[in-house]
């Protein structure tokens, strides 16, 4: 997909299709009024006949309107004008892109009225538009044997009209948004694969392939023997019950100044989580293939950094394994030793994500990082607290946590900071080891973060719990691509600071 921006008159733009918005009660947006005037009032007559009501998510393709350089006109419903904000605007973009993809239209001009939001500059709006349209074209990488429908013919989208002075910012935003959408496809493709294909070794192979594709990247994957030499006792404990060997994936993007402190991204890579001996309920257990969305986000972030040639030093760490029951699996009551020497009592083997992350977070110290951010589908408690709308943010550095919250707000990939005070860590006390891996139901998302916090002392660290936002359940289950947009805003701003 190629994106471009224009200034000037929409009616003068040449494309297979022009796209304009119609509010409910058949109210034309600003660009639709100009189109109607150029077409001699034909658009208003069409609406007066009741052919299109402007309801949100509705669309109507009209051909052969006079006075336009575009060959067709697509009307997109915007819903009530009084409720037209950013979410309605993005919904209209998705509706338009989806409708165009069902045709053989190859080029389109998107002239849908932008939301009135002073916090959104031309760069951010353009980036959001390209990302939204690119993501809307995503097709699940299913393994069905039936013949697949042909790919969409849509290859070029022109966004506007933009003020002439803002065209450079809009073009930069469109380029960044196009890259985010492409990297999001990588994330979603990995996450949507079944666990018998996307194994720890498969993830490691994908990281290696990524490094072959992008010269700025380096990748290596440590095997079981090498992980043992690092004394990652928590990580090894989780993988003990599985026949699939673990991998510890290390990615490096050297785009910043030589010797500059890197940002370290850590992603939970449990490619299938049965719960281990503390076996999960069978209902929806198939969705536990998504327990590696944090790992997929890390790989996608490095793909994005390479596409955009970000001037940042980045390190990615992915502990990848399965969590399975078996004769060798860890049991409730077992005590294991982490890479930094702390002993951990396993009270619940289904609280495995924090175990593998603890060793990865300790490993991050050797890079003397400027900041460490981990992403994990960590707790059902975060879903209870925030639903599927916000990712949870916690950490030991409020400035970093609030920076991520602000990035999520700009990217419309929202997050909410939860408290992480010492009382939550006290809930993890146990008679038999330095710390227990769970602390009961109360504040479960926060006590999980408190556990991770024991391994990040002295680091600037933030934790993103994406259990509620990384995928959607039900008959249309699918990886969402979150929190890549949030992370992209963070990395782009850090690179350009």
Image: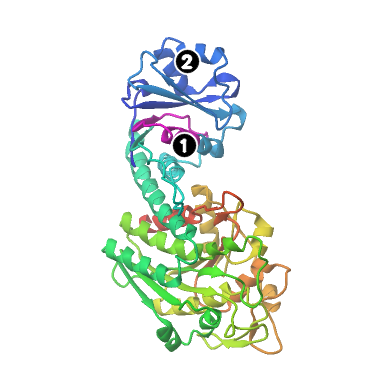
Can you say whether 448 is above or below 108 in the image? below
Residue 212: give x, y in percent of width and height: 28, 65
Q: Is residue 457 in view?
A: no
Q: Secondary structure at mark 1?
A: helix
Q: Where is residue 11 shown, x and y percent of the image?
A: 36, 20
Quadrant housing residue 284: bottom right
Location of residue 51 in the rendering, given as x and y in whole percent from the top left corner: 54, 17
**Residue 428 visible in the snapshot:** yes
Residue 302 magenta: no
What colour scheme does the image use?
Answer: rainbow
Residue reaching furthest to the left: 215
Of labels 1 and 2, earlier in sequence is 2
> Which of the labelled discs sits on residue 43, or is there none?
2
Considering the image in quadrants, where does the C terminus appear? bottom left
Q: Residue at x 70, y 67 (%)?
A: 443
386 sits to left or right of 313: right
Q: Which mark is residue 98?
A: 1
Q: CA distance from mark 1 to mark 2?
A: 22 Å
Q: Is 114 a magenta residue?
A: yes
233, above or below 188, in the image: below
Residue segment shown in magenta: 95-116
Indicate the quadrant containing the N terminus: top left, top right, bottom left or bottom right: top left
């Amino acid at each position: 997909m190629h994106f471009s921006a224009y200034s000037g008159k929409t009616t003068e733009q040449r494309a297979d299709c022009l796209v304009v918005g119609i509010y409910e009660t058949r109210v034309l947006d600003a660009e639709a009024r100009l189109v109607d005037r150029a077409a001699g009032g034909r658009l208003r007559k069409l609406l007066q006949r009741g052919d299109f009501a402007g309801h949100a998510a509705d669309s109507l393709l009209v051909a052969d309107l006079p006075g336009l350089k575009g060959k067709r006109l697509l009307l997109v419903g915007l819903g009530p004008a009084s409720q037209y904000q950013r979410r309605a605007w993005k919904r209209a973009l998705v509706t338009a892109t989806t409708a165009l993809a069902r045709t053989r239209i190859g080029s389109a001009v998107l002239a849908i009225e932008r939301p009135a939001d002073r916090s959104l500059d031309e760069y951010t709006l353009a980036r959001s538009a390209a990302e939204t349209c690119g993501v809307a074209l995503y097709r699940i990488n299913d393994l069905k044997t039936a013949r697949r429908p042909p790919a969409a013919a849509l290859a070029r989208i022109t966004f506007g009209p933009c003020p002439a002075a803002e065209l450079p910012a809009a073009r930069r935003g469109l380029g960044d948004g196009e890259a985010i959408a492409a990297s999001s496809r990588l994330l979603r493709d990995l996450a949507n694969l079944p666990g018998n294909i996307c194994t720890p070794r498969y993830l490691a192979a994908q990281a290696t392939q990524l490094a072959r594709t992008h010269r700025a990247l380096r990748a290596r994957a440590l095997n079981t023997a090498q992980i043992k030499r690092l004394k990652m006792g928590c990580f090894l404990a989780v993988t003990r019950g599985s026949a699939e060997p673990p991998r510890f994936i290390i990615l490096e993007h050297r785009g910043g100044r030589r010797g500059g402190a890197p940002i370290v991204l850590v992603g939970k890579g449990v490619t299938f989580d049965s719960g281990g001996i503390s076996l999960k309920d069978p209902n929806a257990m198939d969705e536990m293939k998504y327990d590696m969305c944090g790992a997929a986000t890390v790989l996608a972030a490095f793909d994005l950094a390479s596409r955009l040639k970000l001037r940042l030093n980045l390190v990615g760490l992915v502990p990848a394994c399965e969590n399975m029951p078996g004769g060798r699996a860890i049991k409730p009551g077992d005590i294991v030793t982490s890479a930094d020497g702390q002993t951990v009592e396993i009270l619940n083997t289904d609280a495995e994500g924090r175990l593998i992350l603890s060793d990865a977070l300790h490993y991050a110290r050797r890079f003397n990082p400027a900041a460490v951010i981990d992403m994990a589908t960590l707790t059902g408690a975060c879903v209870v607290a925030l639903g599927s709308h916000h990712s949870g943010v916690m950490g030991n550095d409020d400035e970093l946590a609030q920076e991520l919250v602000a990035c999520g707000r700009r990217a419309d990939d929202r997050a909410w900071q939860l408290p992480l005070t010492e009382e939550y860590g006290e809930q993890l006390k146990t008679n038999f080891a330095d710390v227990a891996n769970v602390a009961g139901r109360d504040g479960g998302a926060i006590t999980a973060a408190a556990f991770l916090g024991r391994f990040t002392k002295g680091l600037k660290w933030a934790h993103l719990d994406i259990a509620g936002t990384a995928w959607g359940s039900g008959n249309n289950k699918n990886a969402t691509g979150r929190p890549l947009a949030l992370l992209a805003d963070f990395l782009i701003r850090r690179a350009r600071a």
